[in-house]
Image: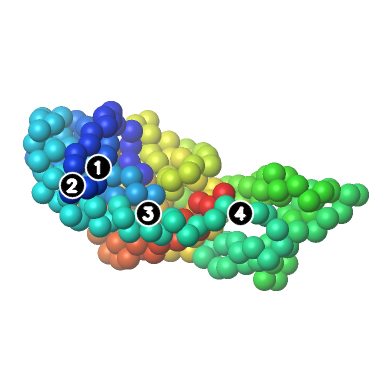
Amino acid sequence: MATKEAATRHRFAYGDEIIDFSLRRQPSRTVPRVSIHVEPDGRVLVDAPDSAAVKDVLAAVKKRARWVSQHVNAAKARLAHVLPREYVSGESLHYLGRRYRLKVIINSEAAIETRMRGPFIAVNVPTRDPVAIRSALDAWYRMRARELLADRLAAIAASLQWVRHTPPMRLQFMTVQWGSCSPAGRITLNPLLIKAPRECIDYVLLHELCHLLHHNHSPKFYRTLDQHMPNWKSLKEKLDNMAEEVFRA
């Protein structure tokens, strides 16, 4: 969820495994040590200052190879049991952290529509077409996200001294990211974030707003995050643990 940096791919052997990682150069990073992240889908991202030689970065990652391997394998294990959706009645859906059931209503005369009905998210479609059902759900999630995420972004931004105006926001469906912040200060959010609990949504929004002050994942960035949301690590873990269900297509 960081600003965009130049990235290169690297790999090394750890026992019988080959560990791949993306090295992101951060010109503004002032500390010499690298920062290693394992994404919910198992991708390994390594942030390093421009001055760090590739051999030194590789040595630093190899020192934490066991930790990286454990987290990559844990991510793969979580994803192994996730089956593609069939978009049929009874399937589990999420909205604001709560679990709902999909209810598909076939009506050839009614317009395509999605709405909440008690414990159900009901989709009216003319035929039992999974593509049409998914499209209707995506449109509904985008509509809900546009309003709620914009409101929360404005509310959180108003509480931060370094944010003079609420930054521009756009929505974009992404397969593995919750959001990003461009160098120009535009925040892009995944509409599927609307499936997560409200406190997790606030964490993602604060994370991106902190990038307006620190365009990297430096210690200063994390200190700012700690100051404004001391429990962000537990919220991130909660979000990561439900990522495979949220992103499941």
Check contact, mark 1 vs mark 3: CB within 8 A: no
- Check disc 2 and report the residue beneath it: 14
| Residue type (three-letter) at the residue carrying disc 1 | Ile
Image quadrant holding the N terminus, namely: top left
Position of residue 56 relative to residue 122, above or below, is: above
The residue located at (39%, 49%) in the rendering is 41
Q: In the image, which is nearer the foreground, mark 1 or mark 4? A: 1
Spot occupied by residue 116 in the image (x, y as percentages of width and height): 70, 63
- Look at 52% across and 65% down and name the residue there: 97
Q: Nearer the viewer, mark 1 or mark 3?
A: 1
Marks 1,2: beta carbons within 8 A: yes
Local crowd at mark 2 within 10 Å, few (<14), some, or many (≥20)?
A: few
Q: Which residue is mark 3?
A: 76
What secondary structure is marked by label 2? strand
Q: CA distance from mark 4 to mark 3?
A: 18 Å
Q: Given the image, on which type of amino acid does mark 2 rest?
A: Tyr
Per the image, label 3 sits on a secondary structure element best described as helix
The reply to whether callout 4 and callout 2 are in contact (CB within 8 Å) is no
With 121 as the anchor, is 10 left or right in this view?
left
Whole-percent x and y of residue 62? 13, 45
Q: Amino acid at mark 4?
A: Arg
- For the residue pair 178 and 157, the one nearer the viewer reads as 178
Q: Position of residue 241 (x, y in %)?
A: 40, 62
**Residue 18: mark:** 1
Give the foreground label among 3 and 2.
Answer: 2
